[in-house]
Image (spheres, rainbow, N blue to C red):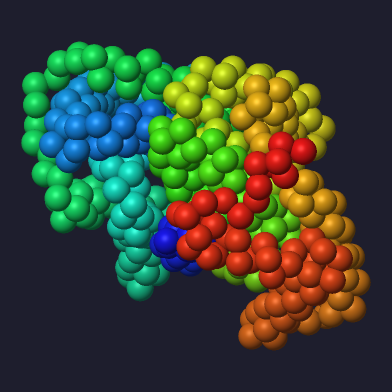
Amino acid sequence: MSLVKKFATVASGTLMSRALGFGREMLMAAALGTGPVADAFNAAFQFPNTFRRLFAEGAFNAAFVPLFAKEIETHGTDGAKRFSEEVFGVLFTALLALTIAMELAMPLIVRYLVAPGFADTPGKFETTVTLATIMFPYLICMSLAAMMAGMLNSLRRYFAAAIAPAFLNIILISVLGYAWYHGLDAHAVGFGLSWGVLAAGVVQLAIVWVAVRNAGISIGFRRPKMTPNVKRLLILALPAAITGGITQINQLIGTAIASAQDSAVSSLAYADRVYQLPLGVVGVAVAIVLLPELSRALKSGNLIEAANLQNRSVEFTLFMTLPAAAALWVMAEPIVRLVYERGAFATNHSTPVVAAILAIFGLGLPAFVLIKAFTPGYFAREDTRTPMIFAAISVAVNVATALTLFPRMGAPGIAVASAVAGWVNALMLLAVLIRRGHWGRDVPLLRRIPRLVLSAVVMGVALYFAEHWLATMIGPGSPLVVKATTVLALVAGGALLYFVTAFATGGADFGMIRRNVGRRGIEAGPPVAKSELDE
């Protein structure tokens, strides 16, 4: 199966989840708007979600996958099963202890870490503590599920792990539908959503557990023991957890700073949901597929294939995200108006702020996705320390910029800080890969990048004028059907213009498509000669 076909397998499941996420956020915006319960729920959910990325997805996709792949290569399925059981015992025990400690300390954590700005708002602080207490055990389920997803990805079974997150949105949409049908108030909706998050964690864990068993590996519980393999995993996982969860760390910091202003937390969350669609469909798919493929290439000593995998991933990443970034920058307000502007959201006049945040996030989108394409180049070589250092620098940049801009700009200032930190991180990752000789210079790729940028700019300019020409059809007073049809037509027309311009200027060609889609490009050898990569 080709690299892009593997990307597409993961992206299809992710796309379903993100599309359902849109539906969830639309219903949530109508039910809660950007009011105090929305702020409380989003702040409370951000906390376990950050830990999930730190101790689960980031750590295990970075550290567990290469070690699990090595066990399969050297000791077969039995060795991989033994290693998985050793890790499962240690992970479950550690997560249980962490969860108990966090539950007991939740009031202090919310007051001083998650949302210090809520402490002076009557009722808001207490609601946030209660919702966070309900949702935090979600971490156990999702961390164990992330471990099993890593196993499935190493076994080249991508779909179950990609589709499982959709059930979070399915369950939360069901909760919101029930709340709307029975006319529940905002507080009841918030509590229902929190219990729904916990239920979704159990469902997602069950899905990947069954998929792992069907893949031929049955995991039993072993008494926690620090074996050499587990020690090696922990050495790799700690910095990888910080690196893999850098976006979430920055979001958690942004949430803490934004809690000082009413509606800022929920405004950031609603904008985040929109830009997570292209980030998830492209970035997450690239990161999930590239790491095990790159690990195999390096373990087998095929450096040419490894260089080709990295270059093709960046090629695919830029080809897909540059137009998305331009569209988000130009069309942020019509998109937010279409997706969210109804019910409590419209009453609070939240559209301009959320649109401004979304436009800025759009400028950072290519950086966020490139980070996911660059970090496997380190993780596959079992170097998790260097990306951790860059992540720490990125966090420092984010905090300094956010604290500087938030008093002047409000929530959009936090979005600026996040975008700047993303670009700083991406450029540092690329620079060191090049300096170490781990990034083969691909002349055709270097020629395409400015042409893809030009194509995205042409599309953005055209969308800008078209948006103003059709202002009455996408404005606040326009009927929903007219508004939706017009926005979708603008998106489709912009995409067509981008692809035509990209092919006309040489930013893309059919040879590039064949290299990425054809089987031979990945499995039978690279389509680019070594001399061309090293030019």
Residue at image point 86% right, 75% down = 466
Residue 276 position in % (x across, y down)? 57, 52
160 left or right of 38? left
Which percent across, then down, holds residue 189? 38, 56
Q: Is residue 47 visible?
A: no
Toward which corner of the image does residue 228 lie, by quadrant?
top left
Q: Quadrant of the C terminus?
A: top right
Closest to the observer, 434 or 464: 434
Q: Where does residue 442 sit, x and y in percent of width and height?
A: 72, 44
For the point 38% across and 64% down, the residue is 173
Asked if residue 451 can be seen in this view, the reply is yes
Q: Is residue 469 left or right of residue 406?
A: right
Q: Nearer the viewer, residue 533 or 436?
A: 533
Q: Residue at x 70, y 28 (%)?
A: 434
Number of numbered discs present? 0
- The residue closer to the viewer here, 366 or 125, is 366
